[in-house]
Image (cartoon, helix red, strand yellow):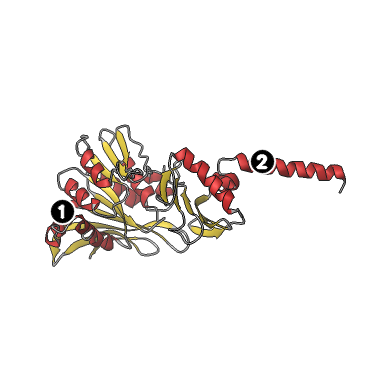
């Protein structure tokens, strides 16, 4: 190789390196730009993973700890968030709508743990989900009718099963003359509705004040003339506030982590107990059975395929704290079956 060729190669390499450095995500920019990648997570600067088609892959990208921290510092500046020893977690929304989560030592053992969830399917309608084989056309028509009939719908499933995508599609099926209030920890829902207000929680500041919880937002939403209330995810005591709102005549929707429709209802009978010692199962069982109409369970199989596995109707009947349910739709591995008593 001549000196001129070597010089030209060095110049090209430097230009490429410079391009990577000025890109917003540095060496991670190619992963951000790849529309087939659903999620990126970093266990260490040398072990960077992606999810594609529901399956995880180890990338060949290798960073140093200072490089990774420099990239994340730029990202956090865009988000207006900070992270330090007193606040070792960050949960934020990136400008493109992706969700960012960071945890740092000493919460993690040695390295920064970073997750970027890209929500590639967030803007999909129920019809789009039919085309993607997430559900059948018959099931889509059933869900559209349920939404228009103002039924209360709980979407259940595991992490990355597609709960938020499905919830967003269901909310987008709400009639255009209704006013919808969405409540989330981080903005993820973007329903295609003309009259929609989105609210998100806020963490406490360095002095430990200023926190706004989901419970507070539910109470405020009730003063905003909602036709419907939508909770991005219920995890703790806010489940009680949602149940009270639904029982006051305002229809709503929410997601919950669960392994089946039945487990989702059992979990909803348990979470409100976190709200205080005066909450009893005698109160919760009839409250849940009258508040929730449908549970739609979506799952991600070991082949990376997302599909609605079960749609169950909650009957307003219970015995010994067991709430009766009936399957409207049940996926048997090949097709949907109709009508099973549980």
Q: Quadrant location of the C terminus?
A: bottom left
Residue behind mark 2:
18
* Furthest residue in direction right, as rendered: 2
**Left or right: 300 in relation to 139:** right
The structure residue drawn at horizontal position 59% and vertical position 40%, both measured from the top left corner, is 23
Q: Secondary structure at mark 1?
A: helix
Q: Position of residue 7 (x, y in %)?
A: 81, 42
Name the residue: 36% across, 64% down: 332
Is 144 rendered above or below residue 43? above
Depth order, front residue of 314/253: 253
Q: For residue 229, what is the image quadrant?
A: top left
Q: Quadrant of residue 33?
A: top right
Marks 2 and 1, how far apart in space? Answer: 61 Å
Identify the residue at the far bottom of this view.
320
Disc 2: CA contacts within 10 A as few (<14), some (14-19) or many (>=20): few
- Kindly tell me whether residue 288 is visible in this rendering: yes
Q: Nearer the viewer, residue 27 or 255?
A: 27
Judge depth for marks 2 and 1 and give the one in front: 2
In the rendered image, the vertical position of residue 17 relative to residue 235, given as above or below: above
Q: Position of residue 281 (x, y in %)?
A: 15, 62
Tally of numbered discs: 2
Q: Picture coordinates of residue 125 (x, y %)?
A: 38, 43
Quick one: label 2 or label 1, which is nearer the N terminus? Answer: 2
Q: Are marks 2 and 1 in contact (CB under 8 Å)?
A: no
Residue 192: image x %, image y %?
Answer: 36, 37
SS at mark 2 in the image: helix
- Circle 1 packing at 10 Å, graded few (<14), some (14-19), many (20+), is some
Dot label at residue 290: 1
Farthest residue, direction front: 207
Residue 142 visible (yes or no): no
Classify 306 as above or below 24: below
Residue 44 is marked as none
């Amino acid at each position: 190789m001549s000196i001129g060729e070597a010089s030209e190669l060095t110049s090209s390499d430097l230009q490429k390196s410079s391009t990577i450095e000025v890109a917003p995500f540095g060496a991670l920019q190619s992963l951000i730009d790849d529309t087939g990648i659903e999620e990126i997570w970093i266990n260490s600067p040398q072990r960077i993973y992606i999810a594609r088609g529901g399956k995880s892959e180890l990338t060949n990208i290798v960073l140093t700890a200072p490089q990774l921290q420099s990239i994340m510092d730029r990202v956090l500046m865009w988000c207006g968030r900070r992270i330090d020893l007193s606040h070792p977690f960050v949960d934020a929304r990136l400008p493109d709508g992706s969700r960012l989560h960071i945890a740092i030592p000493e919460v993690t053992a040695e390295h920064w743990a970073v997750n970027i969830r890209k929500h590639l399917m967030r803007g999909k309608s129920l019809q789009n989900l039919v085309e993607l084989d997430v559900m059948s056309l018959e099931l889509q028509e059933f869900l559209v009718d349920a939404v228009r009939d103002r039924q209360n719908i709980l979407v259940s499933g595991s992490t990355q099963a597609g709960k938020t995508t499905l919830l967003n599609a269901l909310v987008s099926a709400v009639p255009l003359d209704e006013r919808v209030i969405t409540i989330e920890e981080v903005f993820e829902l973007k329903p295609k509705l003309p009259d929609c207000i989105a609210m998100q929680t806020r963490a406490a500041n360095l002095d430990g004040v200023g926190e706004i919880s989901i419970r507070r937002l539910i109470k405020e939403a009730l003063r905003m003339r909602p036709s419907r209330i939508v909770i991005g995810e219920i995890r703790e005591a806010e489940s009680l506030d949602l149940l009270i709102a639904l029982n006051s005549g305002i229809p709503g929707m929410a997601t919950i982590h669960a392994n089946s429709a039945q487990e989702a209802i059992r979990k909803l009978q348990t979470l409100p107990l976190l709200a205080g010692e005066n909450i009893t199962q005698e109160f919760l069982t009839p409250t849940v059975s009258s508040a929730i109409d449908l549970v739609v369970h979506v799952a991600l199989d070991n082949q990376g395929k997302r599909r609605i596995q079960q749609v169950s109707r909650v009957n307003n009947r219970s015995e010994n704290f067991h709430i009766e349910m009936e399957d409207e739709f049940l996926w048997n591995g090949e097709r949907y079956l109709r009508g099973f008593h549980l």
